[in-house]
Amino acid sequence: MSTTITGPDGKPRCRWCGATPEYLAYHDTEWGFPVGDDRRLFEKLSLEGFQSGLSWRTILAKRDNFLAAFHDFDVDRIARFTQRDVERLLKDEGIVRHRGKIEAVINNAQQARDLIEREGSLAAFVWRYEPDPSQLAAPQTVSTSAAATAFSKDLKKQGWKFVGPTTAYAFMQAMGLINDHVADCAIRSKAESARQRFKRPQG
């Protein structure tokens, strides 16, 4: 089976982005492009946790609702959420109403707040786990890696939840720590150019 599909412009794209119309814009403008913004990094870690056991399509369709419910994934605001907020979120039909996942986001915001205080930024910590491209498998042939496992272990050691190695790898793919667009994908070179221009955050 081919690893690509033909996009609306006639150019090849990673096969997965043809599954639903919402995927195309996400694939072309976000997935694999490097991110150094703490809020966006925390949003993605949180949404990957919510995706556990579900499809990304479900999460992407509810993304605006998640952003509203969690105050644009502002770490400081979420870290101050109380049990009352948990109950409010459990009644919000626009998001995934899973107590464990909601409580994990609040817990992770508290851990992120401490981490930012220690490291200077979440981005500086995250980008420490960018793997050497020469050590990577062929694009989209694995669901985790040594770097993702190490990243996951470190987060768990600090008390984060819903951050297993597969979740960590999906996060790294999406946030541009690796360029996992397949070789023939028209977006691969754009993502790679963005990665080359990207200034890695320092603590």
Image (cartoon, grey):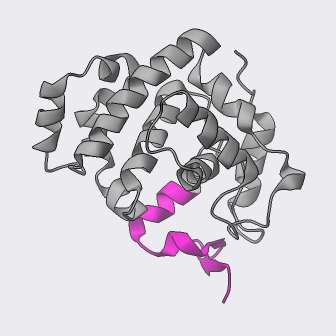
Image location of residue 190, percent across then percent down: 72, 52
Q: Position of residue 135 (x, y in %)?
A: 86, 54
Q: Is residue 102 magenta?
A: no
In the image, 185 versus 129, the foreground residue is: 129
Residue at position x 59%, y 51% in the image: 165
Can residue 114 be seen in the rendering of this structure?
Answer: yes
- Would residue 37 be found to the left or right of residue 44 on screen? right
Q: Residue at x 17, y 38 (%)?
A: 89
| Image quadrant containing the N terminus | bottom right
Return the residue found at the far bottom: 1
Q: Quadrant of residue 115?
A: top right
Residue 42: horizontal and vertical position, in percent? 47, 33
Highlighted range, magenta: 1-27
Whether 97 is drawn above or below 156: the answer is below
Is 197 positioned to the left or the right of 23 in the image? right
Judge from the rendering whether residue 79 lies leftward or rightward of residue 152; answer left or right.
left
Q: Specify the quadrant of the image occupied by residue 61.
A: bottom left
- Locate residue 60, reporting x and y percent: 37, 55
Q: Which quadrant holds residue 43?
A: top left
User: Quadrant where the C terminus lies?
Assistant: top right
Q: Residue at 70% across / 70% down in the picture?
A: 141
Pick out the residue farthest to the front: 157
Q: Is residue 190 above or below residue 34?
A: below
The answer to whether residue 8 of the structure is visible from this angle is no
Indicate whether residue 5 is drawn in magenta. yes
Q: In this orientation, which residue lies closer to the viewer: 73 or 135?
A: 135
